[in-house]
Image (tube, rainbow, N blue to C red):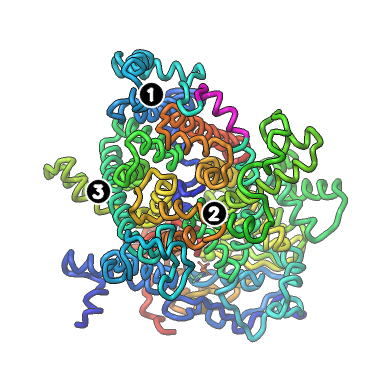
Amino acid sequence: MSTRDWLLADSPTSRLQANVGRAYRVFTALMRNPLSVLGGAIILVLLLTAAFAPWIAPYSAVGQDLANRLMPPSAAHWMGTDELGRDIFSRVVWGSQITLTIVLLVALISAPLGLLIGAIAGYFGGWVDRILMGFTDIFLSLPKLILALAFVAALGPGINNAIIAIAITSWPAYARIARAETLTIRNAEYIQAVQLAGGGPIRLIVQHVLPLCTSSMIIRVTLDMAGVILTAAGLGFIGLGAQPPLPEWGAMISRGRTFILDQWWVATMPGFAIIIVSLGFCFLGDGLRDVLDPKSEGKN
Amino acid sequence: MAAPLLTVENLRVSFPTHTGRVEVVKGLSFTLGRERLGIVGESGSGKSMTGRSILKLIRKPGEVTADMLEFDGVDILSQSEKQMRAIRGARISMVMQDPKFSLNPVMTVGEQIAEALVTHQKLPRRDVQARIIEMLHAVRINDPERVAKLYPHEVSGGMGQRIMIAMMLIPEPELLIADEPTSALDVSVQAQVLDIIDELVRNKGMGLILISHDLNLVSRYCDRILVMNGGRVVEECAAGQLENAQHPYTRGLLAAMPVINETRDELPVLDRTQWAGT
Amino acid sequence: MAIDQQSATPEPAPGAASRRIVRGFSTGGGFVLTLFLTFLGLLAITFFIGRVIPIDPVLAVVGDRATQEQYDVAKIAMGLDQPLWMQFISYVGNVFTGDLGMSVSTGRPVIEDLSRFFPATFEMATLGILIGCAIGIPLGVTAAARQGSWLDQAIRVVGLLGYSVPAFWLGLVGLALFYARLRWVGGPGRLDIFYDGLVEPVTGMILIDSLLRGEIDIFWNAVSHIILPAAVLGFFSLAYIARMTRSFMLDQLSQEFVTTARVKGVPERVVIWRHAFNPIRVPLITVIGLSYAGLLEGSVMIETVFSWPGIGNYLTTALLNADMNAVLGATLVIGAVFIVINKISDVLYRVLDPRAR
Ligand SMILES: Nc1ncnc2c1ncn2[C@@H]1O[C@H](COP(=O)(O)OP(=O)(O)O)[C@@H](O)[C@H]1O
Ligand SMILES: [Mg+2]
């Protein structure tokens, strides 16, 4: 039996085979959509850039060279230099590490938080549900960026606080999803069977509810990443996120603002990086949604 | 009989899927005069696609071909979209399955019927109103003035389907295609709706194609019957001659029809192996 | 940034959150109660941000250059010797009587500052949403009507760009191109310097005030200044509105009653606008409302870039000066506008849709 047959078997013989087979099917379906391939490639490039930044970047991110300040793009400096003579391309490359860190940490904080709150609300129902979801809905009906700004103002500027603030404003959407999924299976017979067999709520939530939420969560988190990147860059631009001399893209644009009329490249170049990476997440998220949850967008 | 109203020869409808183009109607042929033709077959056998190709309603990825698809001397397949609009509604019309979905939810009943009429005839407003009331009367709606002001969600299923019929017949077409017109309705109003269709079609001397999965019903309201299975016609006969049907699929359908005052230990099941591969 | 609080997926129907709140609490009371509870939730959040998170909220208010004496006075004045729930109640009471505290950076009551800066934001966001609707709706309808065409693909990409382009960056690039290079539009600010202060504020919106005074020169100057920031905001709302319109339209076009209309022989233009578009007008109102609220949020970034004297600029200035009263006041106002717009679109939904009546 070939590997492909094993992967696509109609009746897998083990849980591992079923899971791997499903992942393979999702992967092949994704590969058929050119935009999701492009999105995936962009994310891959982002990962590689972040991992190999020291080897890719031709200059240091912070090394100043005042003799060469505000040089336009050239062979030596592909994206030009900034007001301290730093190579913008190198800073963009190093900045990918910051962007990746922000995105990963926000996802790692907010998604589990939302999952947990939603699953608890859905599982217990009644007053627990009403209070948790009332709270979630209030958060959802408020502007995210403004809330994040207010949180950072209270916590103090800096990249860690920015991450916390963005995570605090991101969890409610995930709580909604987790609650909906939990409700659909709460009364399923196999759940009752597990309960009869003495499975406690924690075991049930972790082993049975959470796995069911993963595909909708993955779609949602991927699509939200563009928003997270933009919010983080916005905080950096206002001066509340990553602080100089960190090569955070939003903060770099903020520095370039002063020179926008004459040295346009200083502010423009990091913007392209933000756009490309955000688009990458959008493309991939869109493609994932088409594959994993085809009915949610009104096409086909 | 003079020249037929509708001639269909070797009609094929196909759709692209990941495994290539799939034909869902595979070479259908029939002719229709000013008579009542029934098309029966199980769900998915291609009945609706047949009805929709006659109106040229199958859209983009779907493809329709035929050696001949002629309505009253007009070659349907060569008509432009604009020319088709003059035929749709005015000359060929269609009643669909479920009035819940086939009526526009945010237009009143009267507006929707009026639209069907004024699309094809320019009439003064008062005449339009009078025609609507008259037509609603014809489908046995007692207080047409009130009903015309209602929204579709405010009327029952049976009333909705009668409104649909009124809307489709008001421009006085020559051919009506009724695609499972009663499948979504309560059993209690099914006969009423079919009686109305039958009466109007006969009075106006129209042609009717009644599509259904219910052989019993079709044999009651039609002159001639086409049995479809898997995109093909497997049997064609006059309604009275059903008991002489040859094809095992038709015989299977007949055997499955319940008969009053009968007790069977086991309900018969279609044995598909008999005609597999035909 | 304008729209990024609505993630790229159209699936959670806009306004759905507020509708859920309504449903969740409607058993316990009516519309006013839910509105009140939502405001209370907002207040709880701003209270939490202002009084609980900061290690020393007094310091956050008076700043670290204050003397010990000022510090003590402020502490008593803020009621920080009281238990937390008492503090919250008096906070709610203050807010409902319009007392948002003093701004340390301007030295005026926050509420006064906010009402002074609000018209500029309102003017820009309103023009932005008008641009967004005027372009976004026809684009979305056309994309759906020609699903799969190059136009549809292009609109899809524009829609995704709306989620991927930082608003502040687009504003900067716009300034560099249309102001510095091409000289098509005015620069930052609401007017050229020599027109500044010539028009006495009546509504606070310069476009309207200058017309009221018959100052046509000033009006056109104001137009040349507002058009770029409004167009940038408009881009974000048009991306979102076009995407949602397309998705709603595709949904409608696959409905059986659209086929009914075609069976009747109705022209395609009528099928699209009367049969497919009319039923989505009501959900579109919700989308537009949400997008409008999103523009108020997006204006924070845009106003910073364009030195636009609105609430967003006020908020960022306050943020950088750690002027917490001003920050929370602006957050409260923008949050309240959000909630009210949500509620209004919710009510409109019920009033306008025959199925919901
Ligand atoms: N857009 C489509 N793409 C692919 N297959 C389709 C499409 N529309 C219908 N079909 C297939 O065509 C077949 C015939 O459908 P239909 O004519 O609606 O059957 P019925 O006899 O129940 O009315 C079905 O098997 C259906 O799956
Ligand atoms: Mg059918």
Q: Mark 3 points at which residue?
A: A209
Residue B49 coordinates in the image, percent (x, y):
56, 71
Residue B202 placement: quadrant: bottom right
Does dot 3 land on a helix, a strand or a loop? Answer: helix
Q: Which amino acid does label 2 sit on?
A: Leu
Chain of the residue on which disc 2 is drawn: C
Q: Are marks 1 and 3 in contact (CB under 8 Å)?
A: no
Q: What residue type is labelled 3?
A: Val
Mark nearer the viewer, 2 or 1? 1
Magenta residues span: C107-119
For marks 2 and 1, give the CA distance: 34 Å
Residue to which mark 1 is pinned: C62
Could you say whether the residue bearing mark 1 is in a helix, strand or loop?
helix
The question of residue C114 being in magenta is answered with yes
The C terminus of chain C sits in image quarter: top right
Instruction: Read off the chain for label 1.
Output: C
Within-10-Å neighbours for mark 2: few <14, some 14–19, many 20+: many
Q: Do labels 2 and 3 share a chain?
A: no
Q: Where is residue A11 in the image (x, y as percent from the top left)?
A: 23, 70
Q: Residue C41's x, y, as percent?
A: 40, 28
Density class for disc 3 (Cα within 10 Å; few <14, some 14-19, many ≥20) is many
Q: In this view, does A25 lie to the left or right of C325?
A: left
Considering every residue shown, the one lying at the far left of the view is A198
The residue under the point 59% across, 81% down is B11
Q: Is mark 2 on a helix, strand or loop?
A: helix
Residue C291 highlighted magenta (yes or no): no
* Disc 2 and disc 1 on one polypeptide chain: yes
Disc 2 or disc 3, which is closer to the eye?
2
Q: Name the residue under label 2.
A: C172
Residue C217 or residue A234, whichever sits in front: C217
> Disc 2, ligand 1: is the CB inside 8 Å?
no
